[in-house]
Image (cartoon, rainbow, N blue to C red):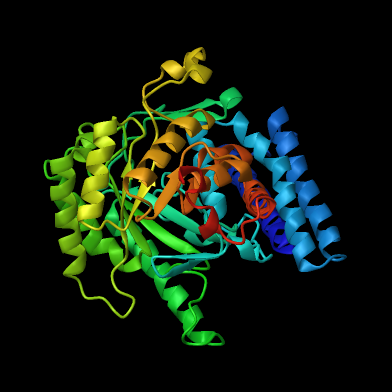
Amino acid sequence: MATRIALKFIRDCSVYRKIKSNNISRHSFCTGASTAATPPPPIPKKVPQFSKTGRLFTGAVLSLIIGGGAYASTVDEATFCGWLFSATKLVNPFFAYLDPEVAHRLAVSAAARGWVPIEKRPDPQILGLQVWGRRFSNPIGLSAGFDKNAEAVEGLLGLGFGFVEVGSVTPVPQEGNPKPRIFRLPKEGAIINRCGFNSEGIVAVAKRLGAQHGKRKMETSSSSSSTEDENVHGGKAGPGILGVNLGKNKTSEDAAADYVQGVHTLSQYADYLVINISSPNTPGLRQLQGRKQLKDLVKKIQAARDEMQWGEEGPPPLLVKIAPDLSKQDLEDIAAVAQALRVDGLIISNTTIQRPDSVSKDPTAEETGGLSGKPLFDLSTNILKDMYNLTKGRIPLIGCGGISSGEDAYKKIRAGATLVQLYTAFAYGGPALIPQIKAELAECLERDGYKSIYEAVGADCR
């Protein structure tokens, strides 16, 4: 991998020098044409002036390339893989110097182009589990919002996530809310966003997922070494499980029609589907969490999914993502609908419009939008525990909100989560955080005498 990155870097530098050379040549030619009798004056050589941050970043990248290439020649693949993940800690801090949305775009592009480490080491066996008939090598997932348009599914799954959720995807492309719309609170390990479902639309996402799905089918058909009766780790898009998060357009007057369109177009590529009715940045969206509205919406979406033709594996599970800013009655209503309609799962939770004491003194906290990260942990975990009790542990729950360590993930599992998701901590910590959380989670389970994830689910609710 280090050799490949080095070659790409050298090639890019060569192309840049060639372009600069061509520009100088064209300038000289034009000057000569305008003054035929007088030779063009010599162009003084100028040393490019780079910012201090740029020089530091370039130096760090070159050091990683050279050091990585030398190190790779002396160690085994697993050890080198660990070094690569650790090495990202040197590069990741430079993203903090960039505008949050620019940094986000660069991170997605890097993953899409394969400029991120690939996890070669097997996950701890204690982390493996099966949910909805699908096998997860570990319960750590990347939540929706990072890869909104399914540009980097393969690269993100390759980082070692047990599952990746793309979206939210809207039927029609939309820009979302005006910029700036993402704000960092680094001291609190938090982010406020008011993106508003910026999306390239279901057609663009369907093309990407279709190509990825076709590639995955070719890979699985060519490698038929596993027995037929054994489920293989991974899903429709790669080594991990792929979730597709569906949203509605801001100006849409028929929310159900938007979600149904998403189901018809994207469900064939998804290992599970999510109805996002809890973003605080789309006007009126959270009203769909009401008992009657939710019941009517879920019925229509389930009918749309079930009317499609499915193979032996059946239709993808349907989950609902809810907000943390719900009353006790709201939670009871959602639990009742989820059980009555046999919803396959719930994601708890989305971002919050509240501003806990830990962030209230930060001037950035006054920005409108949903708060994610460490300050959300307690609020979302309490809602998770309440929902586990209300559903009596009969519905798989995904715990999301404020996870930044293996201990945090473990607390979510003990509160009732079968799977967990992170985003903000990944934005701050980078790829190195993923193996760290998995190792810490395995240690927590073993420390308390559990032999599997299943045994720990809901332990604090018994």
Quarter of the image for residue 79 reads: bottom right
Q: Where is residue 429 in the image (x, y as percent from the top left)?
A: 63, 40
Q: Which residue is drawn at 74% across and 49% down?
A: 86
Q: In the displayed structure, would residue 24 be above or below residue 189?
A: below
**In the rendered view, does 120 fall on the left or right side of 311?**
right
Camera sees residue 401: yes
Quadrant holding the N terminus: bottom right
Q: How many labels does the image show?
A: 0
**In the rendered view, does 341 fall on the left or right side of 151?**
left
Q: Where is residue 422 in the image (x, y as percent from the top left)?
A: 51, 44
**In the rendered view, does 58 fall on the left or right side of 375?**
right
Q: Which residue lies furthest to the right in this view?
A: 74
Q: Residue at x 24, y 33 (%)?
A: 329
**In the rendered view, does 136 fall on the left or right side of 342?**
right
Q: Which residue is drawn at 36% across and 26% down?
A: 353
Q: Which of 368 and 399 is in front in this view?
A: 399
Q: Residue at x 52, y 38 (%)?
A: 424
Q: Which of 457 and 175 is in front in this view?
A: 457
Q: In the displayed structure, would residue 440 be above or below residue 280?
A: below
Q: Position of residue 4 (x, y in %)?
A: 70, 63
Quarter of the image for residue 176 reads: top left
Q: In the displayed structure, would residue 28 be above or below residue 76?
A: above
Camera sees residue 42: no
Q: Where is residue 393 in the image (x, y as percent from the top left)?
A: 38, 52
